[in-house]
Amino acid sequence: MDGRPRGTLEAAVDPNKHGRGIYIMDTARINAYYIGKKYRYIYGCGAHRRRPTNFPNMLTEVDLVNKTMNNWYDKGSIPSEPFFVPQKKMMVYVVISDSHGEGYALLLDGFTFEEIARAKFPYGCLVLFK
């Protein structure tokens, strides 16, 4: 929606490029600096319907200007909602690994959405640290 009472609804990503009805996104976040302002990127937990699950199984960055998205996926992992580090444009997530029953903190580059670091926990932990 564009914010007007009779605004228009448009797709956040190009359905011809990314598919129709394949991706689902929840717990969406933006950089808190942009609350109430125009923003370009949305970050959240997603689920890919071709990887069936009852929980989010990937992390997603959506570029609203270019209508593109980047995904991070680790088989058997369930990510938490994102925590944004604006000074470095990095994303921090807490993830539970289904395959090992352990959890880890994950640091992703906000520009490339590639993994920078991972710190393992000795147990599963699905919380947001602020």
Image (cartoon, helix red, strand yellow):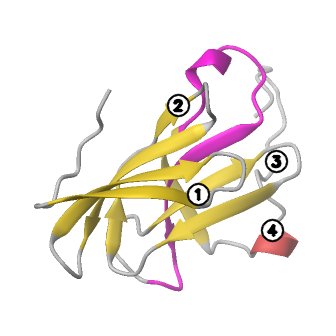
Percent x, y of residue 128: 29, 38
Q: Dot 3 corresponds to which residue?
A: 10
Q: Is residue 85 above or below residue 24?
A: above
* Mark 3 → mark 2, Cα distance in angstroms: 28 Å
Q: Check whether the beta carbons of the residues at disc 4 and disc 3 lie within 8 A of each other.
A: no
Q: Earlier in the sequence, mark 3 or mark 2?
A: 3
Q: CA distance from mark 2 to mark 4?
A: 29 Å
Q: Is residue 42 visible in this depiction of the protein?
A: yes
Please identify, in this view, whether the residue under mark 1 or under mark 3 is nearer the observer.
Answer: 1
* Foreground: disc 4 or disc 3: 4
State which tag comes first along the sequence, 4 or 3: 3
Range shown magenta: 29-51
Would residue 118 be found to the left or right of residue 49 on screen? left
- How crowded pointer 4 is (Cα within 10 Å; few <14, some 14-19, many 20+) is rated as few
Q: Residue at x 78, y 22 (%)?
A: 38
Circle 4 residue: 15
What's under tag 3, amino acid-wise?
Glu
Q: Nearer the viewer, residue 117 or 21?
A: 117
Can you identify the residue that label 1 sits on?
60
Q: Earlier in the sequence, mark 1 or mark 3?
A: 3
Q: Nearer the viewer, mark 1 or mark 4?
A: 1
